[in-house]
Amino acid sequence: MAKPLILVLEDDAALATMLRYNLEKEAFRVDEATDGPEAITRISETTPDLVLLDWMLPVMSGLEVCRQIRRRPDTRHLPVIMVTARVEDQDAVRGLNTGADDYITKPFSIDALLARIRALLRRANPVATQGQLSFHDIVMELASHRVVRNGRPVHLGPTEFRLLEFFLRHPRRVFSREELLNSVWGADIHVEPRTVDVHIRRLRKAINAENELDIVRTVRSAGYALDTEAI
C-alpha cells in the first residue's frame, strides 16, 4: 500500500525543510510548493492525499488556493489543513468557511500537527463498510462513500461525510458540540468547538436544496440533531 502523499505549501524554506523531515520520518511521502500557482499545478499533475496549506503566501493567498481546490470537481473532497499565524477567532472561522477541513496556528508542535493529519486522513479514507444508512429522504451508501437526497447526488467533504454518518447512525438524538468533537474528530484531537458550527453550516449547505426541509436541527443551548421536526 502506497504511503500517503502530503503536499506542503509553505514559502518559509526552514519550516518547509522541518516539515519534510518530520513527515518523511513518520512514513509520509512529501511534495512541496512555495506559492499558490505552483501548488495548483502540482495538484493537477499528481493529486496528493492531503494539502498542508500556509495562509500567508506570495502571489496567491492560501485562502484563494483553498477556494480553487474546492471549485474543481476532481479536488473538491481533497483534505486541507490550513497553517496560519493568525490567531483571532474570526480568522480561524474564515479559513474553515473557505473550505479548509482543519487549521493549526503557528507556532505548533509537530506532534499536534501529525495527530491532525492522521485524524483527517482517517476521516477522508474510512474503512469500507457494507450497507447503507438512511433517514427521511437521505441515503448514504457506505461502501461507495456516496450520498443522495431525494434522488440527487450530494457532494460532501470528508468531515461533513463523517458528521452526516454519525447523525444517520443516531437520528433524533441531540448532541452537544463537545460530543460531536469527540465522536467525529476524536477525543485525542484538540479542536475548538466553533469548528463544529462551521462544518454544520457546510453540511446544511450541501444537503439542503431549495424548498427542502433542513433536517439538521439546531437545539438552543444543547447542540444539534438530525430530525424532521423542531426539537
Image (tube, rainbow, N blue to C red):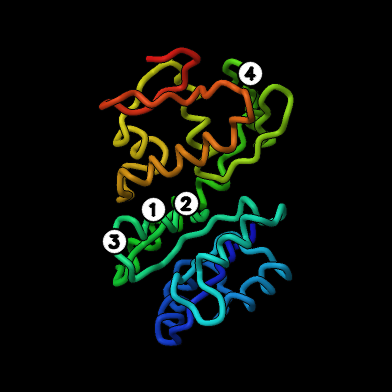
Q: Residue lying at the far front in this picture: please name it.
A: 211
Q: Quadrant of residue 209?
A: top right
**Is 15 positioned to the left or the right of 108 in the image?**
right
Mark 1 near mark 3, Cβ–Cβ under 8 Å? no
Q: CA distance from mark 1 to mark 3?
A: 9 Å
Q: CA distance from mark 1 to mark 2?
A: 6 Å
Query: Closest to the observer: 57 or 120?
Result: 57
Query: Closest to the observer: 30 or 68?
Result: 68
Q: Nearer the viewer, mark 4 or mark 3?
A: 3
Query: Closest to the observer: 113 or 161?
Result: 161
First in sequence, mark 4 or 3: give its number: 3
Mark 1 near mark 2, Cβ–Cβ under 8 Å? yes
Q: How many marks?
A: 4
Q: Which residue is mark 3?
A: 88
Identify which amino acid the numbered label 1 is placed on.
Answer: Val
Q: Which residue is mark 2?
A: 97
Q: CA distance from mark 3 to mark 2?
A: 14 Å
**Is 67 positioned to the left or the right of 74 in the image?**
left
Q: Residue at left 62%, top 60%? A: 69
Q: CA distance from mark 4 to mark 1?
A: 30 Å
Q: Which residue is mark 4?
A: 137
First in sequence, mark 4 or 2: give its number: 2
Mark number, residue 80: none
Q: Which residue is mark 1?
A: 93
Where residue 226 appears, as percent x and y from the top left, is 46, 22
Query: Closest to the observer: 231 or 46?
Result: 231
**Is 121 positioned to the left or the right of 137 in the image?**
left
First in sequence, mark 4 or 1: give its number: 1
Identify which amino acid the numbered label 2 is placed on.
Answer: Asn
Q: Residue lying at the far top in this picture: please name it.
A: 229
Identify which amino acid the numbered label 3 is placed on.
Answer: Glu
